[in-house]
Image: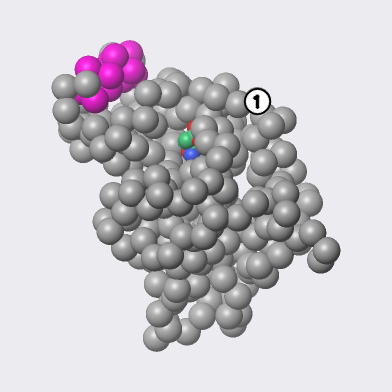
Amino acid sequence: MSWQAVGIFDSGVGGLTVLREIVRVIPQEDTIYFGDTARVPYGTKSPETVTRYAHEITSFLVRRDIKLLVVACNTASAVALPSLKRSFPIPVVGVIEPGARRAVEVSKSGRIGVIGTAGTIRSSAYTRAIKRLNPEAEVLTKACPLFVPLAEEGWVDNQVARLTAVNYLQELKDAGVDTLVLGCTHYPLLKPLIAEIMGAGVVLVDSAAETALTVAGILGQKNLLRPVAEIGNQHYYVSDIPAGFIRVGNRFLGGRLGDVYQVNLDEDGEGN
Ligand code: DGL
């Protein structure tokens, strides 16, 4: 057993969809969430830059004595996971592998669609993870960058969202995928619309939900889970003023966000 917290980070507010699932699956755990609101979005940035940001944030969280790190951001998971695993002495869980595993499990035809940010799709991380599990799988990918601002704006079922979604998704639908991986933190908010456009025959895989189950499994295996009777606390840090994070975050979490603290990563850890 370990009383240390689970660390989670994202480029901003989107990773709260992953946090929500973690709290649902292992409510006894304390969590420390870091949203890099000063530098969001990651989806448009180079792998080198995103990897540098990921290392800075992980150092911050490790200084807060976490027992496991969840890289909730798909873009950061896609480009920075191996180097984080090499550099830090705690278990590091990304969202790509759990989502890929679930997609391979549920796909009957082996034709799997993946949607994500430009950075995630460019990295081919989902395609590699899926093909490692099923070399026969056919993976069709599509970057859907406008889904991020739409989700943050709360435009998840109006005309603009619908037109955008049809534009992005029609080719995957026409290609006959039977499974679609929602490979971005923000996309679970658009799930009802995406499901409607893709049709009843297509299973949507939510990487956030699969990641939470993976985290619970690893903590269980390593005997690091807190007793189930406990009720965990959620702590939040951001790198820009918290107002926007609180406003959008309450929508992402359903109004349960606690205190949010702003930190300067350049100054944190100085003198330690
Ligand atoms: N969190 C990012 C992801 O899951 C989406 C937002 C961004 O581009 O930073 O890829």
Observer-nearest of 205 and 260: 260
Quarter-of-image position of residue 70: bottom right
Q: Which residue is rendered at x = 35% and y = 65% of the image? A: 24
Q: What residue type is disc 1 on?
A: Ser
Name the residue tied to disc 1: 46
Q: How is the image coloured?
A: one colour
Q: Secondary structure at mark 1?
A: loop
Q: Residue at x 55, y 24 (%)?
A: 44
Which image quadrant is residue 190 in?
Answer: top left
Residue 128 x/y as whole percent: 59, 31
Task: Give the magenta part as a residue range.
Answer: 161-172
Check the image and report above or below for 61 versus 223: above
45 lies above or below 40: above
Left or right of 241 in this view: 169:
left
> Image point 62% across, 63% down: which residue?
68
Q: Residue at x 30, y 35 (%)?
A: 153
* 237 is higher (above) or lower (below) than 200: below
From the viewer's perspective, is 176 left or right of 4?
A: left
**Side (left or right) of 62 relative to 165:** right
